[in-house]
Image (cartoon, coloured by chain):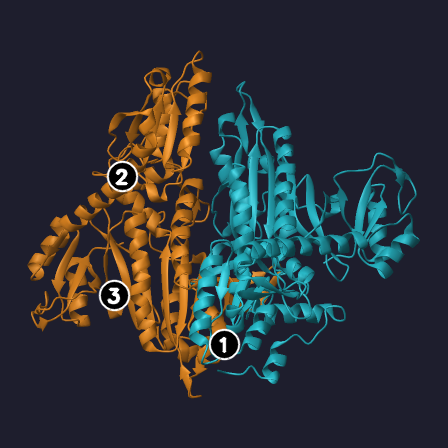
Chain colours: A cyan, B orange
C-alpha cells in the first residue's frame, strides 16, 4: 500500500485562504479539485468530469421542468450568416464586438463571414418566421442546450467569465402580450428553484435597468447572486422581447379574425457560470463543497483495512454500497494503492458531501463512521440506521449550505439613504446596497461614477411607500439593488 | 371545428414515392413531418423538436450504457489552435481540407487561426498529456456529446451528410495494448444494441480497410447500414489509435516499475446521421415511421367528438391518457380546431407508432380503436385490456421494423466470386456484395474503378476456409463487404 506522503498532500492541497486571497483560492479550488482546467485557447475552459457531471445535474433538473411546462428542445446551427446577425439593430450592436468570425473553410475564402453564435435569436427567428402562419401555430415554446462564444476581452475567470460557455437558450413566441408576460414568472420560478433548491444559491430577483437590459429586449429580468468577495454576479435571466425581433424578422400570424398580427417573444437562459458561483459560495480552504442535489457522488465509502482485513472490509463496504445505491449516488473507493488518509484528502478536495468510513472494528461493533464535508463533523452511526441517517444528513447539508449563503446575502444587504451611505455600503461594508432610485439614466450613471458599483436590478416586489432617490433626492416609488459586480 | 380541406392535406402530404424517387421522397418526409428544416447556411440543418427528441432518446440510452461501463463525460473547447491540429501528420491531412477557420474576433485579426473542431483529438490530448503521469491515472475513459463541423463540398443531404452534426466522441487511454483492444467489443456492442434494439437498424460490423480508416488511427471498425436505395452508409465507428497520438502529444505514464511508457488510445462515435438512416429505412409514402423505443410520443390518443359529446369524450380520453402515461410516452390530441381526419394524417406523417381512437360509441361499448403506424392495421380493443395491448403492440412494432429491415439487408447481400459477378451484384441487384479480397490496395482500387463501389468493411468473424480474391484470384483468408456508398 502506498503512503500519501506529506509533501504530495501539501502540493495537492490549497495554499491560499478564501478569506485572504479570494481570487487565488478560487483558481486553486477549481484546478486542484480537478473540476476544470485551462485550455490552449485563452478564456475557453476544459470541463473535467466533475464539472461536467454537475452541469448534467443542473441541465437535467431544468430540462425536466421545461418539458413539464410544455417547452420542447431543438438544435439550430452553430454558424450565423453576417446578414442575419445584422437584422435587428440593437442586437447586432450589442454582440458584434464579441463575435468570432469564420472567414475561411479548407483553402477557400467565404463570400460572407459566418458568426459563431453568441446567442441564437437571429438564426432561430429566420425559421420561426417561416413556421408561424396562423394562431394555431402559437404558442411556440422552444429551447436549446448548446455552446456559445463571446470573445470578450476582459480578464477571463473560469466559469464566471468564459469566452465559450454552455447554457440553455429558451426562445418562445406568443400571440398576445399577456401570454408572453405571463411566462416570466413561470420561467423565473424554475430558475429560482434550480438556483436555490439544487445549487443552494440564494439571489435577488428583479428587473434590469434600461442600460443593462439584453441587446434587443424590451425588458430584462435576472437573479443576481452575491459572491463571497462582496461583488454581485448575474445568474439566470429572462427577457421580454416584445415585438422587436418579430418586426425585424417578420414573425407574424393570422389571428382568429383573419387579421395579420406580429407575435410576442421571450428569451431566457441559465449558464455554466452557476457552477462558478456554487464553487465560490460553498467551498472552503480544504477545497470544493458541492450541494448534495447536484453532486455526482453524494456518498463516498472509504474502507479502512490492512493486508489481513482487506477481503472482509471491502466485502462489507461493497454490501453497504449496494444498499445505499438504492437511495443515493454512492461510490466505493476500494483502491489499495492509496492510504485512507490520502483518500480522505482527495474526496474532501472534490467536495463529496458525505464520507462513510468502515474498518474491521466497525464491522465488529456494527457501526460506521460518518463525516460530513460542509462542517467536517464526525459521528458514529449504527449499521441498521445507515439509510435513514444518509438521507437526513444529505438533506441537512443541502439546507445548511443554503441557510448559510442566505444569511450571508442578508447580512450583506444594507439600505442606503444618500450618496454618503451608499459609498459606505459599497466600499466599506461590501455587498448589496438597497436604494431608492428615480429611474433617470443620469442618476444611474452618477452611481457608477461615484461608487464604482452599478444598479444590478430592481426587485419585482416594489414598496408601497415612495422614498427619495439616493442621488438626486427626488421622490420615487422605485427601489433598486446596487453592487460592485463581475 | 375547422375542416382539414383536401387541398391542404394534399399540400401537406408526400407526393413522391419511396420506390420511384427515393431522394425526393426522403427530403419530403423530413420537411413535411417537421422533423428538420434547412437553414440559411448550406449543409447545416435545423433539428426541429421531433428530430431533437429522437436524438435525446439515442443519446440517453447510449449515455447510460457508457456510464455503466465507467466512461465519464467532459466538455472541451470548440476551438482548436492551428498548431495543435497540425501535431499528428495523418490526422491534419485528413481533416484540414474540411476545417472552418476563425480568423477574426470583433474587429481584431487573430495571430493564429482557430479551427472549429472537426473532431477533438488534438485539443483533448494536449490535456491528457498533462493529466496522465502514472499508471494510477489509467485507464482514462472520457466522452463528450457535442457539435462538430466538417466543411465538406459534396452534395449535403439532411442528417446523412451535414456540415455540422451532433455526436458522441469517446476518447480513452489505457496502459496496455490488450486493455485498449478489449474495449473494442464493449463499445461496438453498445452501438450494436443502440442501432438494432432502439433504432431497429441492422448493419454489418467489420474492420475498415487501410485506405478507409480514420485519419490517425491504426485500425477502424464500423457498423455499415444498407439504405433502401441499395447504397451502404457508415454508422457508428470505433478506432484503435495505438500509440500514434500518444507519441505526437507525449501521453506517457510511469508504470509500476517506474519506467516511462507511451499510452494506448481509442476513439469512438455515434452521430445524428443515424436519424437519417432510421427515417430512410422505416418510413413510407405516408411519412415517417419511428420505432417505439426512440419515439418521443409512442401513443397518440385522438378523441372523436362533436359539440354535443365533446366534454364526455375528452374526459374519457384524459382518463385513458392518465392510465397509459404510467407505461408509455402518450399524447392526447384534444385540439378542437382540427378534424379527426386531419389529426390522423398529421400523426401518421409524424410517424407516431400507435394511434388510439375514442368516440361516444366506443365509450358505450367499453372499447377503443387501435391503429398501428407501421402496418396501418386497425382493430378494436376492450377498455380493460388497453395497457396490455399497448405494451404488446409497441413491442411488436419494434420487432417488426427490425425484422423487415434485417430481411432487406439479408436479401440484398450476395456473394460474388469474380469481377463479372461483382459488377452484376453492384449494378443490377444493388446492395452488399460479399467477396474474398487479397487485402492489396491495388485490388481495392480496381474494385472502385470497375464497379463504382468500395470495400465498406471486413466482417469481424472471418471464415475458416480461404477463397480466391474477387479481382486477382490469389488465395486469401479475408472476406469483405463491397457496396456503393454515401
Q: Which chain contains the residue that carries disc 3?
A: B
In the figure, residue B419 lies in which quadrant? bottom left
Do marks 3 and 1 share a subunit? Answer: no
Tell me the SS state at disc 1. Answer: loop
Tell me the SS state at disc 2. Answer: helix
The quadrant the C terminus of chain B occupies is bottom left
Looking at the rendered image, the disc whose residue lies closer to the viewer, 1 or 2, is: 1
Compute the Cα span from label 3 to label 1. 49 Å
Q: Is residue A19 visible?
A: yes
Looking at the rendered image, the disc whose residue lies closer to the viewer, 3 or 1, is: 1
Q: Which residue is mark 2?
A: B397
Compute the Cα span from label 1 to label 2. 54 Å
Q: Which chain contains the residue that carries disc 2?
A: B
Compute the Cα span from label 3 to label 2. 33 Å
Return the x and y of residue A329 as percentages of the image width and height: 50, 58
Q: Which chain contains the residue that carries disc 1?
A: A
Q: Nearer the viewer, residue B59 or A150?
A: B59
**Which residue: 10% across, 65% down?**
B470
Residue A291's place in the image compared with A28, above or below, is above
Return the x and y of residue B407 as percentages of the image width and height: 17, 46
Do marks 1 and 2 share a subunit? Answer: no
The quadrant the N terminus of chain B occupies is top left
In the figure, residue B420 lies in which quadrant? bottom left
Circle on res. B208: 3
Residue B14 appears left or right of A135 = left
Q: Is residue A47 visible?
A: no
Q: Which residue is mark 1?
A: A305
Amino acid at each position: 500500500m502506498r503512503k500519501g506522503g506529506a509533501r504530495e498532500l501539501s502540493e495537492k492541497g490549497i495554499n491560499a485562504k478564501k478569506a485572504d486571497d479570494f481570487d487565488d483560492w478560487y483558481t486553486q479550488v477549481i484546478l486542484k479539485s480537478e473540476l476544470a482546467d485551462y485550455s490552449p485557447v485563452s478564456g475557453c475552459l476544459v470541463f473535467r468530469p466533475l464539472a461536467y457531471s454537475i452541469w448534467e445535474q443542473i441541465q437535467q433538473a431544468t430540462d425536466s421542468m421545461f418539458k413539464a411546462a410544455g417547452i420542447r428542445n431543438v438544435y439550430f446551427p452553430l454558424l450565423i450568416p453576417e446578414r442575419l446577425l445584422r437584422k435587428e439593430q440593437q442586437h447586432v450592436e450589442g454582440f458584434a464586438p464579441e463575435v468570432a468570425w469564420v472567414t475561411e473553410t479548407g483553402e477557400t475564402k467565404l463570400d460572407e463571414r459566418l458568426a459563431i453564435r453568441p446567442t441564437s435569436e437571429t438564426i432561430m427567428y429566420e425559421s420561426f418566421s417561416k413556421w408561424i402562419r396562423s394562431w394555431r401555430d402559437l404558442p411556440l415554446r422552444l429551447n436549446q442546450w448548446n455552446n456559445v462564444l463571446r470573445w470578450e476581452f476582459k480578464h477571463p475567470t473560469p466559469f464566471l467569465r468564459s469566452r465559450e460557455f454552455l447554457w440553455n437558450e429558451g426562445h418562445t413566441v406568443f400571440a398576445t402580450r399577456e401570454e408572453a408576460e405571463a411566462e416570466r414568472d413561470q420561467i423565473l420560478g424554475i430558475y429560482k428553484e434550480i438556483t436555490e433548491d439544487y445549487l443552494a444559491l440564494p439571489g435577488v430577483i428583479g428587473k434590469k435597468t434600461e442600460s443593462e437590459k439584453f441587446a434587443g429586449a424590451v425588458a430584462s429580468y435576472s437573479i443576481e447572486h452575491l459572491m463571497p468577495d462582496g461583488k454581485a454576479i448575474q445568474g439566470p435571466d429572462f427577457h421580454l422581447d416584445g415585438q422587436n425581433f418579430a418586426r425585424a424578422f417578420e414573425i407574424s400570424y393570422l389571428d382568429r379574425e383573419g387579421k395579420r398580427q406580429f407575435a410576442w417573444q421571450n428569451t431566457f437562459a441559465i449558464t455554466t457560470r452557476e457552477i462558478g458561483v456554487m464553487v465560490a459560495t460553498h467551498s472552503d480552504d480544504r477545497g470544493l463543497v458541492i450541494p448534495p442535489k447536484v453532486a455526482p457522488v453524494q456518498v463516498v465509502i472509504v474502507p479502512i483495512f490492512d493486508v489481513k482485513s482487506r477481503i472482509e472490509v471491502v466485502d462489507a463496504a461493497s454490501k453497504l454500497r449496494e444498499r445505499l445505491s438504492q437511495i443515493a449516488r454512492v461510490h466505493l473507493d476500494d483502491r489499495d494503492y492509496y492510504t485512507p488518509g490520502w483518500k480522505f484528502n482527495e474526496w474532501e478536495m472534490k467536495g463529496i458531501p458525505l464520507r462513510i468510513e468502515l474498518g474491521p472494528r466497525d464491522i465488529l461493533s456494527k457501526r460506521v463512521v460518518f463525516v460530513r464535508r460542509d462542517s467536517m463533523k464526525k459521528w458514529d452511526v449504527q449499521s441498521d440506521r445507515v439509510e435513514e441517517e444518509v438521507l437526513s444528513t444529505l438533506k441537512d447539508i443541502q439546507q445548511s449550505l443554503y441557510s448559510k449563503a442566505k444569511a450571508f446575502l442578508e447580512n450583506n444587504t444594507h439600505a442606503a439613504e444618500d450618496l454618503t451611505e451608499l459609498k459606505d455600503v459599497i466600499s466599506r461594508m461590501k455587498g448589496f446596497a438597497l436604494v431608492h432610485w428615480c429611474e433617470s439614466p443620469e442618476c444611474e450613471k452618477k452611481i457608477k461614477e461615484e461608487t464604482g458599483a452599478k444598479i444590478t436590478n430592481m426587485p419585482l416586489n416594489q414598496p408601497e411607500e415612495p422614498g427619495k432617490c439616493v442621488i438626486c433626492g427626488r421622490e420615487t416609488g422605485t427601489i433598486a439593488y446596487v453592487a460592485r459586480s463581475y
